[in-house]
Amino acid sequence: MCWDRRRSIVYDETAVIEKYGVAPASIPDWLALTGDSADGIPGVPAWGAKSAAALLSRYKHLEAIPEDIEGWGLPAGRARRLQENLTAHREQAFLYRRLATLRRDVPLKERVPDLEWRGAQPDFRRLCDELGAVDLPARVPRWVS
């Protein structure tokens, strides 16, 4: 499942494949290649959504993409440029994938209901004043009393 919190849309596996061109298991690899500005992941130069989807729909993960571009199914010039950039930025791509991967092995003592946002803490107003963000508290919809 994938949740687009800004649009309040939940994507199932079929919808993820339709939207991104890859299965959910390949999304961290897709983000590593294409980048994700919301999370500060720059991606690999020259890799866009279509190129990443074309390769990852076939090879699933970064390490499975062969160095030999013959089987890529892309025009030779395009494939060569992508391969050169992937080779030059391979370590960064693996780091980006790690950053884009949801960790499920971190022990939490809290349960999901305990993590529900109940409002901003009163100290938030003081922090906004200190940082010069005096208009920000007016945009907060709920405060903890």
Image (cartoon, rainbow, N blue to C red):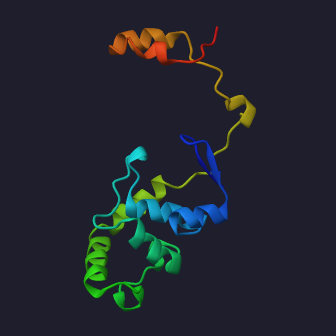
Q: How many marks?
A: 0
Which residue is at the far bottom?
70
Q: Quadrant of residue 66?
A: bottom left
The correct choice, above or below, for 94 with respect to 11 in the image is below
- Residue 43 rendering spot, x and y as whole percentages: 35, 59
Split into 4 quadrants, where in the image is the C terminus? Answer: top right
In the image, is 36 to the left or to the right of 25? left
Q: Nearer the viewer, residue 79 or 109?
A: 79
Going 65% across and 65% down the picture, which residue do you hit?
A: 14
Going 45% across and 76% down the picture, which residue do you hit?
A: 54
In the image, is 38 to the left or to the right of 18? left
Split into 4 quadrants, where in the image is the N terminus? Answer: bottom right
Q: Nearer the viewer, residue 97 or 51?
A: 51
The correct choice, above or below, for 74 with respect to 14 in the image is below
Q: Is residue 45 visible?
A: yes
The correct choice, above or below, for 36 with respect to 115 in the image is below
Q: Is residue 105 visible?
A: no
In the image, is 11 to the left or to the right of 89? right
In the image, is 61 to the left or to the right of 75? right
Going 32% across and 72% down the picture, which residue do you hit?
A: 86
- Residue 74 rendering spot, x and y as whole percentages: 36, 84
Going 44% across and 8% down the picture, which residue do you hit?
A: 126
- Residue 75 rendering spot, x and y as whole percentages: 31, 85
- Residue 7 rendering spot, x and y as whole percentages: 56, 42
